[in-house]
Structures are given as C-alpha cells and as structure tokens.
Amino acid sequence: MREIRVLVATAWRVDRRLTLAMIAEPLGNTLVLMSGLWLAMLTNGVIRHDPRQVVIGIAALVLGAGLGWQLDLSASQWRMVLGEKVAHAFDTEIARLCAELPTLDHFERSEYQNQLELLRQRQGLLGNSLSALAVTVKAICAGLTVLILLVVAHPAMLALVLLALPALLITRTQQRWRATAEDASALPGRTARHLRTVAQDRDAAVEIRLFGLADYVERRIDTLWRAQRAPIEKTERKVALASLAQQLLYVTGVIAAVGFVLHQAIRGTSAPGDVVLAIYLSQQVQTAVIWPIQAVTGFGRTLHTVRRYLWLVDHARAAAPTGHLPAPERIVEGIRLENVSFRYPGTEKWVLRNVSLTIPAGGALAVVGENGAGKTTLVKLLTRMYEPTEGRITVDGTELADLDAEQWRERLAAAFQDFARFELTVQHAVGLGDLPHLDDTAHVRAALGRASADVLPQEAQLGTSWGGADLSTGQWQRLALARGLARTTPLVRFFDEPTASLDAFTEDALFGSMARATDGANGMITILVTHRFSTVRSADLIVVLADGGVAELGSHRDLLARDGRYARLYRSQADAFAG
Ligand SMILES: Nc1ncnc2c1ncn2[C@@H]1O[C@H](COP(=O)(O)OP(=O)(O)OP(=O)(O)O)[C@@H](O)[C@H]1O
C-alpha cells in the first residue's frame, strides 16, 4: 500500500533507530497483556497448593508485566519524538511541493484549493499518522494476544469476537460520515480563512474602514464558520449515538460470556484460574476487540490525509513541465506567438483568441488595451505560469513548451503591479531578484540606481513588524522594480505595470531610458504592459489587445497614422495631460 510505504520510508529517512525502536511498543504491550495468564496460573497454584505454579506465576507476572510496561512506556515516548520529526518532514515537503508547483493552476481551481485547504488543516494529523500506524500494529498484536488468551480461558469466549462485526460496520460508517462532513465544510472554511486574512490585511485596512465593512466581514466570517461547523457537529452527534449503541452491545456480550465461564466453573468443568482469566479478559476484550478496529479505522482516516498528500505529490509530478531542451543563451530572431488562445483552467471564457505576433530580438514591445483585455495573461504565458490552451509560442523557432521551464525563467527578469513585499533588508529584498548576487552590495546598489529606488540604506530592515522601516506603496513598488532589474542580462524583461504607484513622469523617465537600453548583445527583449501612452511611445512595437485578440500592431508612428483605436486612446490621454 503506497500510503504506508510513504509513511515508513519517511520515518526511516528521518531516524532509523527510532523507526526500529517502534517494534518495542507492541512487544511491551503484549507482555503486559500476558499477565492474565500468569494470574490464572498463580490462582490455580494457590488453590491446588502447587508451589511451582505459584513461583512461576509470580516471577512471570513481575518480570513480564514490569519489563513489558517499561518497554511500552519508553517506546511510546520514542514514537512521539519520531512522530514530531516525521510531522516536520511532511510539513517541509508540503511547503516545498506547493512552492515548486511550476504553474499557477492550483491557485485558480476551486477543487485544488479545497484539497490544499484540507491538507493544511490536517497537517498535524499527517505528522501523527506514523504514530497511528504504530498504534494500529500495537492494537492488532493486543487483539491477537487476547484472542489466544480467550481460547485458553474457554473457547466459547471466542464468541465475543462476533462483537467485532457490528463494531466494524459502525466505525466504518462513522468514518464515511466524517469524510462527507469534512468535504462539505472545506469551502466555507476556506472562505472564512480568506476573509479573516483580509480583515487583518494592512492593504485592506483602509477600504474596510472607509466602506464600513468591519461588521459585515465579522458577520460573514461568523456565518461561514457556522456553515463549516454545521455538518461536522451534525455528524458528531450521529457518531456519538452510534458509539453508544456499539458500547451497549459490547457490555451485554461481555456479561453473557463471563457469566457462562462462571457457570462452567461452578459445574466444575473449568478451572478457577479460568474464571480469573475470564474476568481479567472481560476488562481487556473491550480494548482488544474494539481497539484494533478503531485503530485501523483511525489509521484509515490518517491515510485519507496521506492520500491528500500523495495527491499533491502526483499533482506536482503531473504539473511538472515536460520540456527539457536547454534554454537559449541569446535570442537571435525573436519570439513568435502563433494563433495562441488561452482559457484559465476550469473556465470557459477565451481570454486570448488566435493571437499571432512576432517580437524581434532586441526589441521593446508595449502591450496596451483596456482592463481585462488579456495583457497580464500574455505575460503569464511568456513566463510559463500557464501553457497556451491552443497555438504555440516559439523562441527562435523552438517551442517554448519544449524548453526547460526553470532554465527559461532563470533567463527572465520581471516586475509586476502585484508585487511581493519581502520584509527583509533592502539588500536582500532586491538581491532576491538575482539570487547568485544576493549579498553582492555593488550589484544591488546598481539595481537600486536603475530603478531610482535608493530610498534607504541597503542594510536597512523593511517592515515595521520587524522593527524596520515602513514604506509607502510607491517605495515598495520601486524596490520591486529594482528586484526586477537585478538580473542584468536576461533574455526577456517584463514590466507589467510595475510603476502604477509612480507618477507618469517618473514612469516615462524610467522606461524611456530602459526600453532603449538594450545593447543587443544577447538579443534581450523588453515587454512593457502599461496604461500610460507617454511611456508606450518609446517601444519599437505596440500591440493593442481587444476582445482577446490583436486589434492593432505596429510602431507608435504607424498606429497614429492608422488613426484607429490606439490613436484615439493616445490622443485622449495626451489631451488629458495637456488639459
Ligand atoms: N486567474 C484567473 N482565472 C480566471 N480568469 C482570470 C484569471 N486572471 C484573469 N482572468 C480573466 O482574464 C481576463 C484578462 O485578465 P488580465 O489580467 O490578463 O487582463 P489585463 O489586460 O492585464 O487587465 P488590467 O489592465 O486590468 O490589468 C479578465 O477577464 C480576467 O477576468
């Protein structure tokens, strides 16, 4: 079974000695359970005046129970230590898998988000799943030992095993109820979490106050929380009732079995020791018959979580880009989009439809269009956050999908409107854009200079929560831009409205120089997405996207001469500035 293999292999990888030591726990427990046998021997020895039986009984009782108890106790502590180590290993692996998923599909699709949410909620359980495996083995050994002892006490007592059948059915049903409730609570749970994050989010704080959303958000979270709890609570009530029925059944069975052996002893067909053993076992059968079933089903529940983890592993594997050709060191001809169409995963709407265009090596392309025209989507396709649904993108004739995605991204530089705020030192927040130069102060200084972002000393800590400086949105954005400019010789540089928080003149000054700053050595292409036509003007080629397609394509001069959509937009902005 793949789930068990993964658990044991992870434990083995994390700590071999502790993994081996897990055997001590069922062994110790079995020795403790055997006490009933020695108790029966001792009772028979006393009644029959047999000193040998008495001595063996006492010695076995003291040694077996003492040693077994100690083994059981120590091993259960080792198991917990191992469980923590395994939990840490799984948590690290989940974080790694999520961070390394090559595309962004999992952020878009509701079913993936629900799976990830359940996985996050159950991460602790994943860590305990090894413990659950050890407990299951221990419970099964205990069950077998008690079965053997039942036969020794009186074979008829084996009838108690029949109690396992309804218990099995009941626990299985309970497990199914719980899984259904869990699935039903995933979506409201995730939505509530999202709203909680938004409620505490610094960026949302102003709008929440301005629009008077605090009460609404609180009520909504409360409603969602109830919606998340409702199926769970309803299920837990059903589970409790079923457990009660199962207990009643069990107690009735035990009373009948012990009564039967007592009756046999009164009639003289059983030894007195057997009655002692039967009474001892009556306390153990509860555990020995029901415990393994509960342990197996409980373990089944943790396997459910392991299965979600394996889903993530498989998803990461399936999502792994297929291309393995080395990414080029330079672009000689250019990048071509041939009839590229794209729909976001799980949606029906075509965001891009039959887009064809060529971006020549060394050129600067400006992408313009109204909100939602597909400009950012185009950038996402070129950075391989998504693959085209139809059509293809080629770099010097080689299909982008055939290139090694990681290598391709290593040759890109990018700055986005939705930038990350890395609360590190300025040096590192910018150096992350060119990891090999993370600590290279001269390199980062140059990047800061290119983005006109030298607002703070490089060693300054960012973020007030770390006792560091607080920056304005525009200053954060300049740092993000500097990060985007940290790689000095990428093949493609993307600027997707990275200066939305800067004024038009600053943007113009920055990009006017940048778009022209291609030295041609590696055929570097610059792709600029912006709504500001004063900046667009400096690009070699301008593409106007509309309704998912290319509405116009050409240089600033060509497009003005054509007097179409671009010319209208350009003039309206120019008039606005002039006015
Ligand atoms: N993750 C997503 N899942 C589904 N649809 C999306 C997703 N991201 C964007 N879209 C849709 O794709 C279309 C194009 O979005 P895109 O962000 O590319 O537009 P844009 O031209 O960059 O817009 P803007 O100028 O507002 O930044 C929009 O209709 C948007 O709703």
Image (cartoon, grey):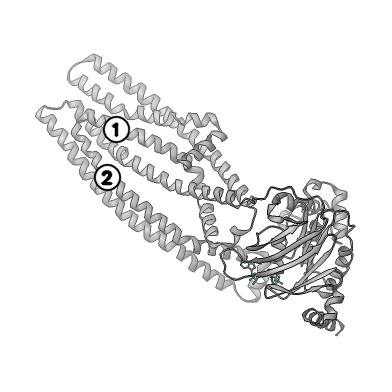
Decide if residue 353 is in sight here: yes
Which residue of the protein is positioned furthest toward the left in this rendering? 267
Of residues 309 and 431, the one drawn nearer to the viewer in this rendering = 309
Residue located beneath label 2 in the image: 165
User: Quarter holding the N terminus?
Assistant: top left
What's under tag 2, amino acid-wise?
Answer: Leu
What's under tag 1, amino acid-wise?
Answer: Val
Q: Nearer the viewer, mark 1 or mark 2?
A: 2
Q: Position of residue 401 (x, y in %)?
A: 68, 55
Q: Is residue 424 left or right of residue 105?
A: right
Q: Residue at x 15, y 33 (%)?
A: 262
Q: Residue at x 84, y 47 (%)?
A: 440
Q: Is residue 338 left or right of residue 5?
A: right
Q: Residue at x 73, y 53 (%)?
A: 409
Residue located beneath label 1 in the image: 146
Among the 4 quarters of the image, the one containing residue 52 = top left
Among the 4 quarters of the image, the one containing residue 159 = top left
